[in-house]
Amino acid sequence: MVEERIGNETMVVDPTVEDLLLQAQELVPVALSKARTVKVFSSRWRVIISRLEKIPTCLSDLSSHPCFSKHTLCKEQLQAVLETLKEAIELANVCVNEKKEGKLKMQSDLDSLSARIDLSLKDCGLLMKTGVLGEVTQPLTSSAQDLETFSVRELLARLQIGHLESKRKALEQLVEVMKDDEKAVITALGRSNVASLVQLLTATSPSVRENAVTVICSLAESGGCENWLISENALPPLVRLLESGSPVAKEKAVISLQRMSISSETSRSIVGHGGVSPLIEICKTGDSVSQSASACTLKNISAVPEVRQTLAEEGIVKVMINILNCGILLGSKEYAAECLQNLTSSNETLRRSVISENGIQTLLAYLDGPLPQESGVAAIRNLVGSVSVETYFKIIPSLVHVLKSGSVGAQQSAASTICRIATSTETKRMIGESGCIPLLIRMLEAKASGAREVAAQAIASLVTVPRNYREVKRDEKSVTSLVMLLEPSPSNSAKKYAVSGLAALCSSRKCKKLMISHGAVGYLKKLSELEVPGSKKLLERIEKGKLKSFFSRK
């Protein structure tokens, strides 16, 4: 502040930017002169002098900007420079006069001064680079009216410039702005802004860390800044927040990691930075949102084969089974089931681990819900080769329920699981008695080609047992649907199984007539030319039947 005497009264006047610039320009040579006379702590003073010598150029660059006199940030920056210059003069006087000061304290004060000069130089440079000086704004205050007038770019610039307290205020206001217009903030962001936000994740102030991770969470969820977040090394501080952040910070950190872990490379990095253990802990103790986000993150990580053993060593199998049993949100259970599906896809040791932790019964209980999803069925499919035939008695009723009530993907996985179980006459009979054959026949008309294929494969396998053969034969839709699947298009992957199923039914005169009436001969001729296995033999059997029928009519 500048004092002016008017009559007998002293008035305090707010200095202009030009006043501050002039004061700083006058103090720089004074500070340098004083610093050069100091004889003690010479190495520290040499560094301080080298930094003081850069200030005139810095001030010149700043003052040459067209908006220099209009911008709040310029004024604040000059005030910071003035305070630093005054401190340099004061400390130089102390050292020159050899006043009684503790050596360690003086060393600390000099290091602090050196850092402050460096910060001022850095901030001046950033102020020029951000381009924010092209926008004229009001002073930074806490009033709601002023808050509305702040430009997003200025708030972002303030995250990079000045001390922690000024950054804290800017960050708080940025969070408020994002509540009303998140898109405006994300659109204005540059890589340097992301870097400053990542740095604030490790600030000493818990509220700063919490607000920083709140903004970063929004950036991660937007999907447009993930590469910047990764390249600016956001993963380590996010993982640390999982361990020691406030409940809000933990939630925002885990949601950020959930989004970022979609990338396999990022998933590997999360494991490398020690993220698995705190993620598992949140699955055990977190609230519903945090638990769901953590389960999803671990699910994403489990899709990377080489880290699955690490996950197992951290106890992921037991945790995911517990979520299936007691998860707060349905989404958490779906993520847990998908994680178990990934873990059991190729590792027999992990399959055994899931089975030993009562995983089969837990998955079946999950599938018995109102709308079974594909991941739970796929996990069961991965496990059927590692359990006894007796366990099939428990699995098959759940598969029937899925074929009746599950999602399209779940039904397809259920049919695929039936194909894996149907390896002997005993298991095929067991499946037939469960009532799933009519459901598989219905599935032959599904819109998804994969569903039609796996249904045809299951029927072709089951129909080799007399009891199942009779049931399939009774349903006329079975023959007509299988004939339709003889269509020779390259995209029709079900045709080879349709051939096998029809070959098993061809011994029935009724079925053979249905095949002929629905055009099987024409399809099979084309399939024979394409050398589809079994098609030529089936064609011969059908045409032989046609000849017999012709002569019998004669």
Image (cartoon, rainbow, N blue to C red):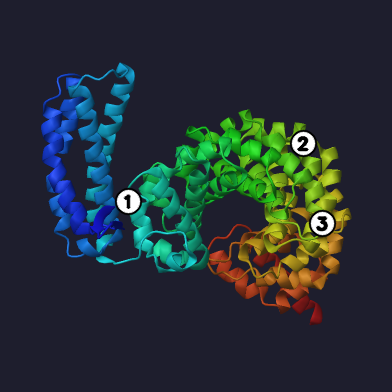
Q: Is residue 464 visible?
A: no
Residue 196, given in percent of the width and then of the height, sits at 37, 47
Q: Earlier in the sequence, mark 1 or mark 3?
A: 1
Q: Quadrant location of the C terminus?
A: bottom right
Label 1 is placed on what type of residue? Ser
In the image, 279 versus 465, the foreground residue is: 279
Q: Is residue 96 visible?
A: yes
**From the viewer's perspective, is the residue at label 1 or at label 2 nearer?**
1
Disc 1 to disc 3, C-alpha distance: 56 Å
- Residues at circles 1 and 2 in contact by the CB criterion of under 8 Å: no
Label 2: which secondary element? loop
Q: Earlier in the sequence, mark 2 or mark 3?
A: 2
Could you say which disc has been placed on residue 387 in the image? 2
Residue 350, given in percent of the width and then of the height, sits at 66, 33
* 19 displayed left or right of 335: left
Query: Would you name the residue on which mark 1 appears?
Result: 192
Q: Earlier in the sequence, mark 1 or mark 2?
A: 1
Could you say which disc has been placed on residue 400 in the image? 3
Label 3 is placed on what type of residue? Val
* 274 displayed left or right of 281: left
In the image, 55 versus 349, the foreground residue is: 55
